[in-house]
Each structure stands twice: as C-alpha cells, then as structure tokens.
C-alpha cells in the first residue's frame, strides 16, 4: 500500500471514502515531479526555442499540483466546498499542460509523451475527486 | 524600487500596466511568509489546541500564495483568462485565513493580527489584479 | 515503471547509472507528502501540545524533501559536487524527523510510524545517492 | 516595519537578536521571487539557447531560497546547529546563480543584473546569519 493511503488510514479523523482522495493526492504528487522533469528535459533539447510555452506551462503545473497535493493531504478541518475551487484550477492547469505536451509528443518528444500522460491522469483524478465533493 | 517591479521592468516582454501585477506578486510573497510564521507562532502558544483550524488555514494559504506569486512572476505566455481562476482561489484562501486570524486577534493574538493584515492585503491585491484582467 | 524513471529515461541527456537517482527522487517526493500528512495528523490529535516539535520537524522535512526532489529532477547541467550539500542536508532533516516520529510511534501514534518509515527510506536513499556522487 | 520583522516580534518565543534573522528571511523570499522571474525572462529571450544553465540555476536557487525562508520563519524548536547546514547550502546556491547571472549581465541582460543583485544580497545575509549561529 502506498504511503499516501497509509497516511490517510492512520489519521485520527479519516474521511469516509478515501480512495478518490488518495488517488488525487498521488496523481498531484506524480504530476508535479513529471512536470519539473519535463521542463528540464525541454531545456536540454536543441529545439528549446520551440518549447518555451511548454516549459512555462510545465513550471506552472508543477507548482499548482504541489500545492493541491499538499492541501488535500491536510484532512483536519477539510472543507469540500473550499478545496473544490483549487482542485478545479489544478485540473485546468493539467489540461493546458497536457495539450501542449501532446503536441510535442506527436513530433517525437518522448518526455512530453510521458509528462502528458501524468498530466491527463492528474486532470482526471482532480475531476473525479471534485465530483465526489459535490455528489 | 522593489525587486519585483525591477524584474517586471527588465523582462523582454513586460505587460502594459504592471503596477497591479507587481503589487499582487509582492502581496502573495509577503502573505506566504506571514502565514508560515503565523502557523509556527500558533504552534508555540499554550492554547495550541484552540488554534488548530488557524494553523491549517495558515499552511494552505502559504502554499496557495506561493504558487500564485510564482505563476504571476512568469510573464512569458501569460494568459489572463487562465490565471484568473488561480488568482481568485488565492483571494478566497486569503479571506478564509484572514477571518480565522481576526477571531484570534480579537482575543489578543498579535501574530494573528499581523498575519490577518497580510492576508487582507493579499486578498485585495488578488481581486484588483483579477479585475484588471477582465476589464 | 514509475514516471520518475520514465522521465529520466526519456531525457535528452540522461545520467549513466540512474537507478539510485530515481530512487532518491521518488523517496524525496514520497517523504514530502508523508511529512505534510503527518503534520496534519498530529494537529488533529488530542495530545497536540505534546506533538509540537514533531509538527515543526515534519514541516521542515516536507520543504527540504520537496526542494531536493525538484533539484534532482533537473538533469541539465547537474553538478555532483554542487548537489551533494543539499542531498546531505536532506538526509539530516529526514534523520531528525524520523527520530522524533519514532518516539511517538513507540507510544502508539500510527501516522508517526508510517511517516518515520518514509523518512528513514528517504534518508537512506539520499546517503546512497550522495555516496554514488563521490565514488 | 516589514511583516517579517513584525511576525518575529509577535512570536510567543522570539529569538534574542532577531535583525540578522529577519534580514535573512527577507533576502530568501526576495531572491526566490527574483530567480523565478529571471528564469522566465531568460525563457523569453531570443538567445534562450545560451541561457539554459542560467535558467537551471535560477530554478534551483528559487526552490532552495524558498525552503530556507520557510524553515527560518519557524522559530519553534529552532536549533542553530541544525539549520546552519541548510543556510550554507542556500548561500552556495545563491553564489552559483549570481556568478552565472553576472556573466549575462555583463553582456546586457538587465534581468540577470537585477537577479544577480538579489542573489548576492541573499548569499551575504545567509553567511551573516550562519555566522551569528556559531558565534
């Protein structure tokens, strides 16, 4: 079992259905790392001048995912209505970054392909978790 | 002149009216630091058990302000519609944290009074900047 | 295969032996999340006043691990001598946090037990990676 | 008076001589923002391919400064010997970034000149604060 799920299970006030929460936290953490690595891989490409927008979106997405992952890791006084705005901003950031990465993946940039996958997984996890909050 | 304004002025593609942007970045950076410090000051209080919600909101607000300040510091391919969602989430986070801090400030917690001021200033700067994006 | 390893493998200038690097990045990312969650779990305990030092060390360790994981994810112009100082600071931060968590785990705090494991794993991964840099 | 100094002054357990601490926190926060902005300004330059190492060092320095500023903002259970390793790693990160920025400033990059100044100020503040810990 991942540390994320274990930390939720051992919290003194764990939420009722925690699988979507755990999946969302994990996806945020993974996506933040992939985006940080993709920004650097783009920087190392000879065609770096064509990748400026991708790097910019990677850096934004890394920061937003990290903040969302941290906020969702805090279960104390967690208020669904309050976090949904942040989670939806995170989903949008992932979508924008994924779209840009996918354009470069189609032209053979393998790090953009992997990063695009991480972004899409995080976008879906954020939308699923936000949906569970309002359900 | 602050480094924030100087960095905007020396950017190869500076925005037209940068004062509200500079003010918003500075307010985010200052608020993030104040919230980190307030969480710690609350931890050091004998009445820490009464300050749990304040600490939680401080930690969230610090993370959101830091990510917003970083995102707004990136002027390359800055898209107003895209950042406004994050800036409004930041304004809401500051408002929630300010309201909690002000409750404790009224009971004599001076660090909550100072932090509440930083949060209110950041909330206002975020709303003013978001307003300029849609104007 | 994890995103961390995939991102290294698709980088235009991947390092020669990347397993220790990938393990160290993953351990940093996992430990940062566990420490953020443990700080929050401690806050939710009735005995929060006894956990103040643990929360403080959790918050520090989360930040240092996050910065170390980000720095190691940037392979472009990566200089072994330059990063080893940061990696060793991270190992020390993990050791201190693990020792504190283990004290509380011995008294039944399950989240501190899980977090202490994440810290020990990260400490070891940092020492192994730093060792490979100077070998 | 800055929020940084006010937050120290209103902490329930403030340190004895806090001016060097406040200066170091403020320099870390300012330098982190300048480095984030400089990485982006470099990305927007036509000569981005010549600025890759500068961008990489900017991103590292932003993260290390942010973590150091956060850690020093936590006065509870602050242990001088324990933080000095991080503060010295921060000073080194600032020195490396300043040296790179100064090379580009000499060739007319004004954002690198401003960022180099922020890095040198932070390097000095870190060394002064670390010196006060061991005095």
Image (cartoon, coloured by chain):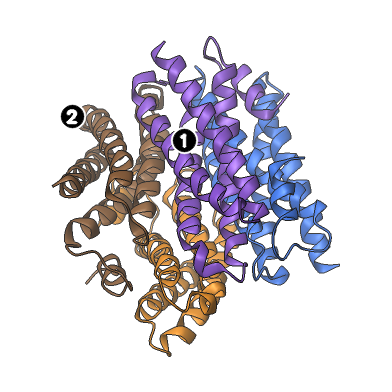
Chain colours: A orange, B blue, C brown, D purple
Residue B12's quadrant in the figure? Answer: bottom right
User: What residue did someone put label 1 on?
Assistant: D68
Residue D12's quadrant in the figure? Answer: top right
Q: Which mark is residue C1?
A: none
Q: Nearer the viewer, mark 2 or mark 1?
A: 1
* Left or right: residue C100 compared with residue D37: left
* Left or right: residue B59 compared with residue B100: left
Residue C34: percent from left, percent from top: 32, 47
Question: Considering only vertical position in the picture, is C72 above or below C51?
Answer: below
Q: Is residue D46 visible?
A: yes
Q: Kindly identify the residue that appears in the image at 67 percent across and 63 percent down.
A: B75
Which chain letter matches label 2?
C
User: Which class describes the residues within 10 Å of circle 1: few (<14), some (14-19), or many (20+)?
Assistant: many
Q: Is residue B52 visible?
A: no
Q: Kindly identify the residue that appears in the image at 34 percent across and 42 percent down.
A: C35
Report the quarter where the C terminus of chain D lies: top left
User: What residue did someone put label 2 on?
Assistant: C106
Q: Are marks 2 and 1 in contact (CB under 8 Å)?
A: no
In front: A74, or C28? C28
Which chain letter matches label 1?
D
Q: Secondary structure at mark 2?
A: loop
Residue B57: percent from left, percent from top: 57, 41
Residue D73: percent from left, percent from top: 52, 29
In front: D17, or C105? D17
Report the quarter where the N terminus of chain D lies: top right
Residue A69: percent from left, percent from top: 44, 56
Q: Residue furthest left?
A: C135
Question: Considering only vertical position in the picture, is C135 above or below A119?
Answer: above
In front: A64, or A75? A64
Q: Secondary structure at mark 1?
A: helix
């Amino acid at each position: 079992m991942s540390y994320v799920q274990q930390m939720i299970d051992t919290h003194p006030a764990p939420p009722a259905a925690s699988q979507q929460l755990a999946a969302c936290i994990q996806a945020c953490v993974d996506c933040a790392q992939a985006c940080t690595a993709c920004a650097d891989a783009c920087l190392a490409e000879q065609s770096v001048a064509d990748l400026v927008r991708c790097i910019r979106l990677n850096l934004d997405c890394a920061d937003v995912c990290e903040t969302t992952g941290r906020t969702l890791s805090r279960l104390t006084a967690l208020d669904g209505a309050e976090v949904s705005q942040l989670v939806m901003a995170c989903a949008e950031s992932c979508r924008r970054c994924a779209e840009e990465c996918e354009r470069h993946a189609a032209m053979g940039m393998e790090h953009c392909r992997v990063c695009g996958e991480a972004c899409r997984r995080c976008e879906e996890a954020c939308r699923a978790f936000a949906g569970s909050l309002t359900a």
